[in-house]
Image (cartoon, helix red, strand yellow):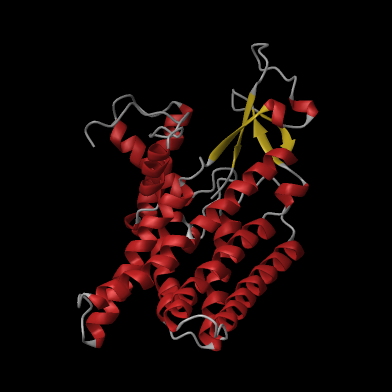
């Protein structure tokens, strides 16, 4: 890390205008190694960043690499708007380890009615918590709305999974191999539909009440429903893309390995291989999906409500673009 660029809090380390830059940014944030960061390290990192912000950090006492590392830790632990510490299991580095048993259950467990409902329920429960913890925190929380959103997502997920599974099972006009291939896509379709619905339902107030938008100087200028709509659209698209490699790839990879005799014959070796394939797919999919859009989105003033289209900054210059926190 000797070649670390000069530190700043004004922009991420990597260029967020490119997909590769966003992928690098999120790959560092979701690295499972950050899951095991101690409270002592978290407190030390926060002290470094707070000292940098206030200007009391002695010049040269901390390297650029150490400053970037401290910022990375703070961004994985604290909510960017509220500053509150996120629950451990809902931090970005926890996503991969938590999803290993969940996705393994959805992909590898026998497709019985109980297994289907159980693993879809577990998955949507975790997604709901993750979505809520990493939401845009502009609005006031509504417990009743959150409960309805969670119930809706679970119903969509379980209903789609069971319904599609039965439909494929009774599709007698298809050959056995075609039904098997379609059956392997059922978990993805159910999770993608429910994932998008989960994100929208859990954050519906961003549509009705709007989200905070900041001008080119980082000053909050109000809340916009149009920005909330763009933000949630991007989140929903991410939720559709995320499960694609996680739930679609493993069954076909494992089947290909089986055909070339690359899958271990003994039970323990086979299970380890299956879980390893699922883990690698999750690890690769998460940063690839959330990098589709920047965490801090940009929207033109002309795409916002009329009251934002003629605002000026402190220099008297017209504000042509605003930013907002999309969340994860």
Question: 277 above or below 206?
Answer: below
Q: Position of residue 103 (x, y in %)?
A: 44, 71
Q: Name the residue rendered at 36%, 59% in the picture.
A: 283
Q: Position of residue 165 (x, y in %)?
A: 56, 80
Residue 323 lies left or right of residue 247; in this view the side is right
Q: Name the residue rendered at 39%, 42% in the picture.
A: 25
Quadrant in which the N terminus appears: top left
The furthest residue to the right: 306
In this orientation, which residue lies closer to the viewer: 317 or 91?
Answer: 317
In this orientation, which residue lies closer to the viewer: 44 or 327?
Answer: 327
Q: Position of residue 289 (x, y in %)?
A: 46, 51
Q: Is residue 136 visible?
A: no
Q: Position of residue 99 (x, y in %)?
A: 43, 67
Residue 104 lies left or right of residue 83; in this view the side is left
In this orientation, which residue lies closer to the viewer: 172 or 119?
Answer: 172
Q: Name the residue rendered at 47%, 63% in the picture.
A: 89
Question: 237 above or below 314?
Answer: below
Q: Is residue 318 visible?
A: yes
Number of marks drawn: 0
Q: Name the residue rendered at 32%, 75% in the picture.
A: 255
The furthest residue to the top: 316
């Amino acid at each position: 890390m000797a070649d670390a660029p000069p530190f700043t809090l004004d922009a991420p380390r990597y260029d967020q205008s490119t997909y590769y830059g966003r992928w690098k940014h999120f790959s560092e944030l979701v690295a499972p190694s950050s899951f095991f960061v101690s409270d002592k390290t978290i407190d030390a990192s926060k002290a470094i960043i707070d000292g940098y912000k206030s200007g009391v950090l002695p010049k040269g006492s901390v390297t650029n690499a150490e400053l970037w590392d401290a910022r990375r830790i703070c961004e994985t632990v604290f909510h960017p708007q509220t500053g509150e510490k996120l629950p451990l299991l809902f931090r970005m580095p926890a996503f991969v380890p938590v999803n290993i048993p969940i996705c393994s259950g959805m992909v590898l467990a026998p497709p019985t009615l109980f297994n289907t409902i159980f693993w879809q329920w577990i998955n949507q429960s975790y997604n709901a918590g993750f979505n809520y913890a990493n939401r845009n925190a502009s609005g006031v929380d509504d417990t009743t709305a959150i409960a309805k959103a969670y119930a809706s997502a679970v119903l969509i997920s379980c209903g789609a999974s069971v319904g599609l599974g039965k439909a494929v099972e009774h599709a007698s006009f298809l050959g056995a191999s075609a039904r098997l291939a379609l059956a392997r896509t059922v978990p993805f379709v159910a999770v993608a539909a429910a994932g998008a619905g989960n994100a929208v339902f859990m954050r519906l107030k961003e549509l009705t009440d709007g989200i905070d938008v900041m001008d080119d100087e980082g000053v909050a200028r109000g809340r916009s429903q149009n920005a909330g709509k763009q933000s949630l659209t991007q989140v929903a698209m991410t939720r559709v893309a995320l499960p694609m490699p996680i739930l679609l790839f493993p069954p076909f990879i494992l089947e290909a390995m089986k055909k070339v005799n690359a899958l271990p014959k003994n039970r323990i070796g086979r299970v380890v291989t299956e879980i390893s394939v699922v883990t690698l797919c999750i690890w690769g999919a998460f940063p690839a999906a959330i990098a589709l859009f920047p965490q801090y989105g940009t929207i033109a003033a002309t795409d916002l409500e009329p009251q934002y289209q003629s605002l000026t900054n402190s220099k008297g210059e017209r504000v042509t673009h605003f930013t907002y926190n999309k969340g994860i």
